Image (tube, rainbow, N blue to C red):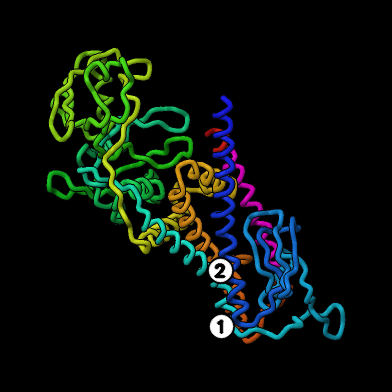
Amino acid sequence: MLSGFISSVQDNVWAVFLIAVFFGGSIFVHEMGHFLAARRYGLKVERFSIGFGPAIWSRRGKDGVEYRLSWFPLGGYVLLPQLADLRAIEGKSDYADKPHGSETEAREPALPPVAYWPKMVVFVAGATFNVLFAFVLACIVSLIGLPESADPFPHTAIGAVSKTVENADGAKFPSPAFEAGLQVGDVILSIDGKTVQDFGDITALIVMSGGRDAAGRPEAHFKIERAGKILDLTVHPRLTGAENARQVGIGQALTPIVHTVVTGSPADKAGFKDGDVLDQIDGTKITSLSVFFDYLQGKKSAPVAIQVLRGGQPITLNLAGPAGANGLYGFASFSSPTKLGHPSPFKLVWDEAVRTGRTIASLLNPHSDVGLSKMSGVIGIVHIYHDEAQQGLVPVMLLTILINVNLAILNLLPIPVLDGGQMVFATIGWIRGRSLPINFIMTTQSVFMVLILILMVYIGYFDVQRLIHS
C-alpha cells in the first residue's frame, strides 16, 4: 500500500512538472514572441507577466523590465505602453499619459508613436511563436515516432453497426447508422463533402456537423464504398452520451489481438494464448471486438468455433461458457496491430489547425449541436494534461501542439483584448489617419475582458462537472 501511495505521489508530481513546462511554456512562448518583436523595433517594454492580476512574484531586471508571475493563470501579457492602453487589464503603466492643457483632456503617450507595420508585427509575433513552438514539438514527435494502425482493414472501414443508441437519460433509440443502411465493411470516404483519413476524422465531423433536414433533425451525408460501388447515404445522428453529442452508432473495423488471458478461465481452457489474432467466429469474419462479443452474447454459453491466427497459421479453438460476471470469458485485454510511424511535422501542425478551424466554425454555426459548454477551459486542460502525463511524454507533446495551434488561431480572432482585436484597432486608426479615442479603446477592452472572464467561469463550471463525473 505504501509503495502504491509513493508511486501515486510521484506520478502526480511528474504530471504537475509537465503541466508547468508545457502548458506554462506555451503561454511563455506566446509572450516571448511579443517581447522579442517589441525589442527588435526598439519599443519600450515595461512588464513581462505570466498570468493576470496582482503579482505573486516580481523582479525588475537591469533592462528596466518588470518580470512577474501573477495570480490568474489565464494567459499573460507584455506591457507595451506605446502600442495599446490596457491599464484596465494589465495594470497602470509607469509611463502615465501626460495631460494636455487640463486634467480632463484626453491624454497622449509620453513615448514616441509607433508606425503601423511594426505594430502589426509585434501583435502577430505571439501567435507566430506558438506556431513555431508547435512545429518544434512536432519535429521531436516525428523523430521519436508515433504508434499508428497497421491493421489490414482500411482506416475508415466500419467494423460494427449498433442497432440502438442511448441518449443522456439512458433511453434507447434505433441507431441512425442501422436505419440509414450502413453496413459492416463499408468504407467511409467523406462526410458532408469533407474527405476522411481515419476514424478520428469521422467522429469529429459527425459531432461538429451542422446539417439539418426540413424537419430540423440533425443530418449528415455519407459517401461510402461498398463492394467496389460508391454510394451516398443520408444519416440522421442522435444526441447521445453525457455530452449530448451527435453520434450515429458505428465502430471502427479493427483486428482484435488477444493480449491477456486469465488463468483457469474458459478462454484459457479453450487454448487461447497472448498474441492470438481473432479471425473468424463460426465462419464469420471478426471485424471488431463488439462484433465478437455480441455474437458470443447471442450464443450465451453454447460452444462456438473461433479461428485464430497464431504465428500466421490458422488454428480453430472451441470456446464455451460460462462467460463470467463481466461476460468476457476470461479475455482480460486486447490490442490491435500497430507500427511506429514518423508523420510529417507539417502535417501534425496542419491537422490541428484544420481541427481548430472546424471547431470554431461549428461553434458559430447556429444549426450545430456544439456549444460553449462542450469546450475545455484551464481546469479541463490541466486535467487532460494530467491524464496524458500518465501515458508518457509524446502524448503530452501532442496535446501541447494542439494547445499552441489553438492559442495562435484564437489570439488572432478580431476580438478586443486579444491580439486580433488590437490589430483591428490599429488598422482602423491607420485607415482614418489617427488613433481611435483612448477612452473608447479602454471601455471596449474592459467590457470584453469582463465577458471573457464570465465565459471562463461558465466553461470552468462544466469542466468541474466533467471532472466530478469522471
Q: Residue at x 56, y 37 (%)?
A: 467
- What x and y, as percent, mark residue 172? 38, 28
- What x and y, as percent, mark residue 348? 38, 58
Q: Tell me the crowding category of disc 1: few under 14, some 14 to 19, or many 20 or more residues within 10 angstroms, Cα based.
A: few
Q: Amino acid at mark 2?
A: Gly
Ranked by sequence position, the earlier of labels 2 and 1 is 1
- What x and y, as percent, mark residue 51? 67, 58
Extreme residue in the front direction: 3
Q: Residue at x 87, y 82 (%)?
A: 102
- What x and y, as percent, mark residue 8? 56, 34
Q: Nearer the viewer, residue 416 or 39?
A: 39
What mark, if any, has residue 126 been given in the picture? Answer: 2
Extreme residue in the right direction: 102
Q: Residue at x 78, y 79 (%)?
A: 107
Span colored in magenta: 442-464
Q: Up-down: is 359 above or below 165?
A: below
Quadrant in which residue 288 is drawn: top left
Q: Is residue 200 left or right of residue 449?
A: left
In reply to whether residue 447 is colored magenta, the answer given is yes
What mark, if any, has residue 117 been given in the picture? Answer: 1
In reply to whether residue 178 is colored magenta, the answer given is no
Element under label 2?
Answer: helix
